[in-house]
Image: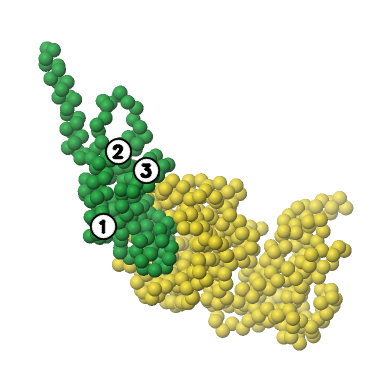
Amino acid sequence: MILRLALLLAALALLPVALLAPVPSLSADRQTAGGKVYLDIHDPNVRKLPIALPAFFNTGTREGAPLGEEIAQVLREDLKFSGLFDVLNSEMYLEDPKKPALTREAIAFDAWRTIKADALVKGKYQAAGGQLETEARLFDVLHERMLTGKQYTGEAKDLRRMAHRFANEVLRVFTEEPGVFDTQIAFASGPAGQKDLYRMDYDGHNLRKMTAEGTINTLPSWAPDGESLLFTSYKWRNPDLYRLSLRDLKAREVSTRPGMNTGGVWSPKGDKIALTLSKDGDPEIYLMAPDGSGLQRLTQHRGIDVSPTWSPDGRRIAFVSDRTGGPQVYLMDASGGDVHRLTFQGNYNTSPAWSPRGDRIAFVSRVGGTFHIFLIAPDGNHLQQLTTAGNNEDPAWSPDGRFLAFSSSRDGRYQIYLMNANGANQKRVTSLRGDSRHPAWGPRPKG
Amino acid sequence: MKRFSYGWLAVLLVLPLLWGCAEEPVKPDAQPAPGTKELTDADKMREKGLEGERIAKVMEEPALKDIYFDYDKSDIRGDAKAVLRENAAWLKQNPKALIQIEGHCDERGTNEYNMALGDRRARATKDYLSRLGISGKRIATVSFGEEKPVCTQQSEACWAKNRRAHFVQVAK
């Protein structure tokens, strides 16, 4: 029995992040929350929930680096960026920070009510020998109840990931859908004439370069399973489509037909790739199998047809065509039928990106001399401008449809920015020397 | 009998040359008789047509001048036609030269749309050279969209320089 327990503990310790959670039932959460804290991101008048996140307590025997503040800070940034919370300034906190009050009984809820916190995250950690254990709990301050609690075990380098995972959990409690704070964003960056693919945590941390061939590698797009990226490379002086495995960072050819092989995007189910080919003399949208075979032409128009994006149900495709003059966004069904124009305002509308929620399409529109991110509903209603500063391009949705990544030149060179789907909380997450373009937001990690 | 066969031989030797001239004004076929020399890579490429071949070597050729385009357009402008006539003359004088036409755009606008625009510019340039008698088999095209600007300031003067078709000599 003791042996079995030891084996179980050993197995859990091997997992990068193991969940051993004393989680209260979801139905209890809902009753406790009482409707007050259910938050709709599309409601512009949503009341932000005041939440306090003091530094996590160090319960280890050894005095290590002060990780408690670091963990809390990751959580604060995540929840602030969600647009759903008013993260209360830690200088306001009245409860004695030295007292490790982590339980419902020990917490001085009066001290949190005084500063008008409705929710409270408390946690502790223990670091030893490169290992890190954290425990985080979310409390409803008004009702003095714990809403959820999680323990994470992993390596010291998993600190940010553990905090992101608990931020996901906080969003799940309040919105019934977990956050996407443990996702990654891929993008292309480099000086003029050269681009490489990078990936990073959604918030810009853990930046890693994935290619280094001295050519132009660009237009990344994630496979639905998150294990590879499609991208376009000029390795052979032609824009060819490759697939980069994230396991070994090896690139394999997918489509190397003469002319453009660009903008490859997987269907939501992962069974097809939509892309632009100009092999027949002008750029047209095609479908093909993930290995590049079984070509099916969808558009039949002498002129430019580019930038396909799938509806989340995989039944429709939005794309860009200049069939009426300047570029405009069009919709068609996934077999090329039922084509109709979506955008009518302005004479330059490009880069459509269909929200995973299905109800909005983000795109780029030229307004005066500058480019901005807009949203529009698939029926042509609800046109909304999201950016106002500098040039803004390449919109890409987060997998939950709450956020958009995009590139902007508002601070000089193009860098990657994030914002809420309503345009709030715009922030820069890269500071590379070259232009950084074409963010692609990865799917939720498995498990 | 002897005389007769010599006559036939003369006809056989001359015919392919005439044939070559008629079909392909710029065909560089001052070559040894077939079978006496292995075809070079460049020759194989010419037989198949250059489009779609993998290009390993690129050489800048100062004699081939860039042409420029209007914003969001791929029409060959009047000033560009004069340049293309000069480029065509060079290609006729250098019949073995294989080239790739790069289509470029200025930085304004969306990358993938600009790739399409650059694709169209390169093809329009190739078509014009073909009409001037240069075999399409000697010409590959590629669009770099806005990825390879020659000028990186944000001004109309700079953008105008980037909206170009550039010519390079290539080998497989």
**Dot 2 crowding, Cα within 10 Å, few <14, some 14–19, many 20+:** some
Relative to A390, residue B74 above or below: above
Please name the amino acid that badge 3 sits on: Val
Look at 61% across and 83% down and name the residue there: A47
Residue A353, image x and y in percent?
47, 66
Which of the image's four quarters has the N terminus of chain B?
A: top left
Residue A116, image x and y in percent?
72, 86
How far, Cα to Cα, is label 2 from label 3? 11 Å
The hue of chain A in the figure is: yellow
The hue of chain B in the figure is: green
Callout 2 secondary element: loop
Mark 2 or 1 closer to N-term? 1
Please name the amino acid that badge 2 sits on: Lys
Answer whether labels 1 and 3 touch (C-beta < 8 Å): no
Look at 65% across and 78% down and name the residue there: A85
Q: Residue furthest front?
A: B62
Question: Mark 2, chain letter?
Answer: B
Colouring rule applied to residues? by chain
Q: Which residue is mark 3?
A: B170
Labels 2 and 1 within one chain: yes
Residue A81, image x and y in percent?
61, 73
Question: Mark 1, chain letter?
Answer: B
Residue A186, image x and y in percent?
55, 59
Question: Mark 3, chain letter?
Answer: B
Mark 2 or 3 closer to N-term? 2
Which of the image's four quarters has the C terminus of chain B?
A: top left
